[in-house]
Image: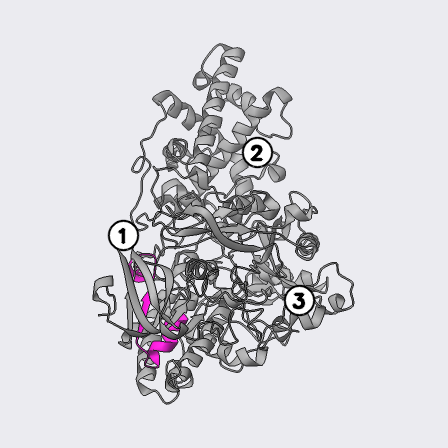
C-alpha cells in the first residue's frame, strides 16, 4: 500500500477512501510552496499549532470556530467537547497553512463563517454567537447534509461538511478522541493473539 | 571508516554500487559479505532509523494532524526524506498531463531509498510470471525461469524475514520449509472476508510481508546463506540477533527503529558495513558511467550535493541500482562516440517498456463490524490477509477480457484514529452533528474495509522514458521525460477489480458509498502511482532486443550491471521488491564468480 501510507489508512473515511488515495497519488507539484515545513522536517519534535506558521483567525473568528465545533462535537458522558480538545487551534493551524489544499479550505471556512453570520442577522438580527442553542441548531439543520440542502444553501452545506470533517479529524486524533472510540492500540506488546474466541463465536466466524 | 566523503574514498574499489535501496542494499550486502571491496554512492542524505523513526508519535503531535501535504505526500510521519512525487530542484517531464497517459514518479533522497517506507508486501513471482509470452502471446518471456530465481527467493526470505504461509495455490509458489515466519493472527475483518469471499469462489489467505513475527534463526541461517565463509556467518549471526521482532504496534511506513521489518538501512547495510568491505558516500548524485579502455566502464562521475563539486570514482565493475528510471537516466546521459544514444544502448531499448502495476481501490462499510468492543487490531500494520489471483482457468479458457491476473490487498480493523476519522460519513449518518454524530462515529469506527487491486501490466510501445531535450535539474543534469499508455488489458482488468470489490462487499453484508467505478479510465490509477515502476533496461537472451543478459550484465559493457527493477521483462501482479532483491543477489553471485575467474 502499498504502500502506500498510508494514506491507505486514512481509510476511516468510508467514502473518502478512493478519493483520498487518488488525491495522494496526484503530483501536486506546481503547488509546492516555499513555506511550510519542507521535505525533511524533524519527525520527533512535538509540534503545536502556530509553531510552523502564524495562526491567522481573528478573535471573533475563533469564537465562532469554537461554537460551531462544539455544536458538532459537544461534551457528553464519554468525552469533552471539540474546543476543549484543542480543535479550534487545530482548525486555525489548518486554515493558516501555506499548502494549496489548506488555502482552498481557508476560503471555504471563512466564506462559511460569513454566511453563518449573515444568516443569523437575517433571522434574528444578531450574531451567530448570540443566538440561543435552538436557533443555532435551526440554522445548522438546514445545511448539515449536502444532499438534502436547498439549492441556495448548497455552498453553506459544503462548508458545513468540511467543517465537520475538520472538527472530527481534529478531535479523534487527540488522546480524548482515541479514548472515546475505544482505540487501545499504539502500545508495544509481546504477542498478538487476534480477537477473543467469544467474539468470533458471536459473529459466527471460524 | 565506512561512511566516507568524496575526498576520502579509496583510489579504487572492486565494485561501485549506485543506489542504496532494495537493489543497492542487496548488491552491496552480497558483494561485501563475500569479500569484494564496495563503494556505495547514494544521492540522498544519511538516514539513521534507530534515532529518526517516529515510532509511537500520534497525529496530534504532528503539524496538521500528520495529513498529506506537497512536502510529505504520504503524511508527515512517512519515512521519505526530500522526496515524494516531486524532489526539490530535480524535476521530470510528462509528455502528457491527461489522466490516461500521465506518469508519476516517486523518489526519495535518503540512505535506503524507498525501502524505508515501502509496503513490505513480499510475494514471489510464479513460474507463469517468467514466461508470459509463451502462455498468452503478449509481452515478452524472461531469459530465466522460476527455478533459476527460486534459490534466491529462499535466501532473501531467510535474510530479511518474511511472514506467510504455503497454500499450494496456482502460480503462487510455496517456500521451502523454514523460509517463512508465521503470519500474524487474522483480525475480525480478515476472518469475515475469508468466510464471505469463499462463497464467491474467492480464496483469501495470509499475506506475505517482510516483518519479523518472531526472532530470526541466527544460529542456522547464516551458514545457509554464507556457506564456507565463517566471517560472514559470524557477522550476520550477530546482526540477526540484534533485530527485534515486531512489537505489534506502529505503522511500518514510518520505518522501524527496532529493525523488525525490512529496510535496506536496517537489514542490508549494518552487516555489510560490519564486514569492513563497504564504504558509503551519501549526498553523491551519480550522473554518468565513464568508459575506459577496451570498452569497459572505468567508474562513475557524481556531484557532491553538499558542495556542488564534481568527482569521479573508479572500480573494476559498476552496478547501477538507482531505481529503474534513475538507472535508465544515468545510462542515457552517459553518451560517447561509441554509444551516442546512451551507454549499453545498442539495442535502442534503454528507457523502453516501462511498466507499473495496475491499481484500483474501493472501500465498503460493513454493518457486522459496527460497534465492536475495544480490540487492539494494530497487529503488524495490516496485510494479514490477501487474495491471490484466482481465475487462471477462466483466463486460459478465454472467458475474460484481459490476459493477466491481479491480487487483492485487503485492510480493515480498529486502526489508530486520525484525520479522516468521522469524515465523509453523510451517506451513512444523514448529516448528523452533535451528540448523535459522536454516537455515529463510535458506531462506524472500525467498520470500514478497503480493497486495493494490484494487477499485471503488459509492456507496450507507448510507455517509455527518454532524456528531455531542454530541461535540466538544479545540478545541470538532463532529466527524464515520460510517455505512458495503457492497453485494453489493463483497463478491463481495473474495471474487473471494481466489480469484484463490489461483489465481496455485498457478500460481507456491506455497502459502498458509490457503486463500483465502471469507467475503466477512471477505475485505473495513473501510471507510476502504485510506485512499482520497472523495466526500461530489460534482460533477455538476445543483445539485439535486450539491454542485459540473465545476470543483469549489460551486453555492451561487460563490467556494467543493472540490478534494480529496470531489468524486469514483465511486471507480474506480485509486488516487485522481493524479485528485485532475488535478482540482485543472483547478479552479485555472478559478479563474484567473474571476479574469481578474473574476467572482471
Protein chain holding label 3: B
**Measured along the vertical axis of the image, is residue B373 above or below residue A33?**
below
Q: Which image quarter holds the C terminus of chain B?
A: bottom left
Residue B308 - label: 1
Tell which of B86 and B369 is nearer to you.
B86
Residue in the picture at 24% in, 68% down: B9
The residue that mark 3 highlights is B203
Q: Examine the rendered structure and indicate whether residue A14 appears above or below residue B117.
A: above
Which residue is pictured at 71% across the width and 66% down the height? B391
**Residue reaching furthest to the front:** B337
Query: What is the secondary structure assignment of the residue under circle 1?
Result: loop
Q: Is residue B367 above or below residue B425?
A: below
- Residue A85 is situated, as x and y percent measured from the top left of the image, at 38, 37
Nearer the observer, A87 or B118: B118
Q: Is residue A197 magenta?
A: no
**What quarter of the picture does the N terminus of chain B occupy?**
bottom left
**Separation of residues labelled 3 and 1 (CA atoms):** 55 Å
- Badge 3 vs badge 1, beta-carbon distance below 8 Å: no
Image x and y of residue B26, in percent: 41, 71
Query: Which label number is shown at residue A194?
Result: none
Residue at x-position 43% and y-position 70% = B212
The answer to whether B342 appears left or right of B426 in the picture is left
Disc 2: CA contacts within 10 A as few (<14), some (14-19) or many (>=20): many
B32 falls in the magenta region: yes
Q: Chain of mark 1?
A: B
Which residue is denoted by mark 2 in the rendering?
B432
Crowding at dot 3, Cα within 10 Å, few <14 / some 14-19 / many 20+, comes out as some
Going from N to C along the chain, the mark reached first, 2 or 1, is 1
Given the current orientation, which residue lies at the most extreme bottom position?
Answer: B228
- Where in the figure is residue B342, as x and y percent of width and height? 46, 61
Amino acid at each position: 500500500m502499498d504502500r502506500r501510507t498510508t494514506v491507505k489508512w486514512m481509510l476511516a473515511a468510508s467514502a473518502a477512501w478512493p478519493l483520498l488515495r487518488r488525491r495522494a497519488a496526484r503530483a501536486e507539484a506546481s503547488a509546492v510552496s516555499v513555506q511550510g515545513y519542507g521535505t525533511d522536517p524533524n519527525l520527533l519534535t512535538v509540534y503545536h499549532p502556530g509553531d510552523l506558521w502564524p495562526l491567522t483567525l481573528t478573535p471573533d473568528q475563533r469564537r465562532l470556530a469554537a461554537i460551531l465545533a462544539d455544536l458538532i462535537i459537544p461534551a457528553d458522558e464519554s468525552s469533552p467537547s471539540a474546543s476543549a480538545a484543542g480543535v479550534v487551534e487545530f482548525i486555525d493551524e489548518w486554515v493558516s497553512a501555506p499548502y494549496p489544499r489548506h488555502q482552498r479550505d481557508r476560503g471555504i471556512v471563512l466564506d462559511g463563517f460569513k454566511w453563518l453570520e449573515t444568516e443569523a442577522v437575517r433571522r434574528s438580527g444578531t450574531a451567530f454567537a448570540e443566538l440561543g442553542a435552538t436557533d443555532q441548531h435551526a440554522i445548522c439543520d438546514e445545511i448539515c447534509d449536502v444532499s438534502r440542502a436547498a439549492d441556495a444553501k448548497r455552498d453553506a452545506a459544503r462548508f458545513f461538511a468540511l467543517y465537520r470533517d475538520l472538527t472530527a479529524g481534529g478531535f479523534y486524533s487527540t488522546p480524548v478522541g482515541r479514548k472515546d472510540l475505544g482505540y487501545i492500540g499504539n502500545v508495544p506488546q509481546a504477542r498478538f493473539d487476534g480477537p477473543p474466541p467469544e467474539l468470533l463465536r458471536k459473529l459466527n466466524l471460524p | 571508516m565506512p561512511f566516507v566523503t568524496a575526498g576520502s574514498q579509496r583510489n579504487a574499489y572492486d565494485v561501485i554500487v549506485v543506489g542504496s535501496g532494495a537493489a543497492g542494499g542487496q548488491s552491496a550486502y552480497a558483494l561485501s559479505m563475500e569479500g569484494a571491496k564496495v563503494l556505495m554512492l547514494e544521492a540522498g542524505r544519511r538516514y539513521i532509523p534507530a534515532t529518526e523513526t517516529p515510532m509511537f508519535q500520534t497525529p496530534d503531535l504532528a503539524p496538521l494532524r500528520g495529513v498529506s501535504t506537497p512536502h510529505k505526500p504520504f503524511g508527515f510521519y512517512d519515512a521519505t526524506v526530500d522526496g515524494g512525487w516531486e524532489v526539490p530542484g530535480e524535476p521530470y517531464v510528462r509528455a502528457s498531463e491527461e489522466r490516461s497517459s500521465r506518469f508519476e514518479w516517486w523518489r526519495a533522497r535518503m540512505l535506503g531509498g524507498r525501502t524505508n517506507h515501502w509496503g513490505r508486501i513480499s510475494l514471489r513471482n510464479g513460474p507463469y510470471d517468467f514466461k508470459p509470452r509463451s502462455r498468452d502471446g503478449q509481452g515478452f518471456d524472461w531469459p530465466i525461469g522460476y527455478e533459476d530465481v527460486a534459490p534466491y527467493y529462499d535466501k532473501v526470505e531467510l535474510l530479511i524475514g518474511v511472514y506467510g504461509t504455503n497454500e499450494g495455490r496456482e502460480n503462487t509458489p510455496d517456500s521451502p520449509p523454514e523460509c517463512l515466519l508465521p503470519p500474524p493472527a487474522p483480525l475480525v475483518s480478515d476472518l469475515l472476508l475469508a468466510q464471505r469471499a469463499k462463497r464467491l469462489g474467492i480464496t483469501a489467505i495470509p499475506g506475505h510481508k517482510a516483518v519479523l513475527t518472531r526472532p530470526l534463526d541466527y544460529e542456522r541461517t547464516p551458514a545457509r546463506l554464507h556457506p564456507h565463509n565463517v566471517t560472514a556467518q559470524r557477522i550476520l549471526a550477530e546482526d540477526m540477533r540484534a533485530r527485534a521482532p515486531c512489537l505489534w504496534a506502529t505503522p511500518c511506513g514510518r520505518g522501524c527503529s527496532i529493525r523488525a521489518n525490512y529496510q535496506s538501512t536496517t537489514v542490508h547495510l549494518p552487516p555489510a558495513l560490519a564486514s569492513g568491505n563497504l564504504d558509503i558516500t551519501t549526498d553523491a548524485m551519480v550522473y554518468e558511467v565513464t568508459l575506459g579502455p577496451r570498452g569497459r566502464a572505468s567508474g562513475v562521475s557524481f556531484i557532491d550535493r553538499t558542495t556542488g563539486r564534481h568527482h569521479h570514482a573508479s572500480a573494476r565493475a559498476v552496478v547501477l541500482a538507482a531505481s529503474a528510471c534513475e538507472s535508465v537516466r544515468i545510462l542515457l546521459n552517459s553518451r560517447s562516440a561509441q554509444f551516442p544514444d546512451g551507454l549499453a544502448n545498442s539495442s535502442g531499448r534503454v528507457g523502453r517498456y516501462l511498466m507499473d502495476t495496475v491499481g484500483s481501490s474501493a472501500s465498503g462499510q460493513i454493518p457486522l463490524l459496527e460497534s465492536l468492543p475495544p480490540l487492539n487490531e494494530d497487529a503488524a500494520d495490516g496485510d494479514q490477509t490477501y487474495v491471490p489471483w484466482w481465475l487462471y482457468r477462466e483466463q486460459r479458457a478465454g472467458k475474460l477480457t484481459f490476459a493477466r491476473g491481479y491480487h487483492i490487498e485487503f485492510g480493515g480493523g480498529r486502526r489508530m484514529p486520525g484525520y479522516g476519522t468521522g469524515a465523509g460519513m453523510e451517506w451513512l449518518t444523514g448529516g448528523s452533528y452533535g451528540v448523535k454524530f459522536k454516537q455515529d462515529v463510535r458506531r462506524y469506527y472500525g467498520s470500514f474495509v478497503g480493497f486495493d487491486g494490484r494487477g499485471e501490466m503488459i509492456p507496450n510501445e507507448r510507455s517509455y522514458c527518454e532524456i528531455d531535450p531542454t530541461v535540466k535539474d538544479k545540478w545541470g543534469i538532463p532529466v527524464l521525460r515520460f510517455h505512458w499508455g495503457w492497453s485494453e488489458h489493463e483497463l478491463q482488468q481495473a474495471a474487473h477489480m471494481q466489480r469484484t470489490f463490489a461483489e465481496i462487499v455485498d457478500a460481507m453484508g456491506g455497502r459502498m458509498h458509490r457503486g463500483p467505478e465502471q469507467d475503466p479510465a477512471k477505475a485505473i490509477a495513473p501510471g507510476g502511482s502504485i510506485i512499482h515502476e520497472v523495466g526500461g533496461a530489460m534482460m533477455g537472451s538476445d543483445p539485439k532486443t535486450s539491454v542485459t543478459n540473465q545476470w543483469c550484465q549489460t551486453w555492451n559493457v561487460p563490467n556494467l550491471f543493472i540490478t534494480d527493477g529496470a531489468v524486469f521483462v514483465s511486471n507480474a501482479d506480485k509486488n516487485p521488491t522481493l524479485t528485485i532483491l532475488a535478482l540482485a543477489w543472483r547478479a552479485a553471485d555472478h559478479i563474484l564468480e567473474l571476479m574469481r575467474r578474473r574476467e572482471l
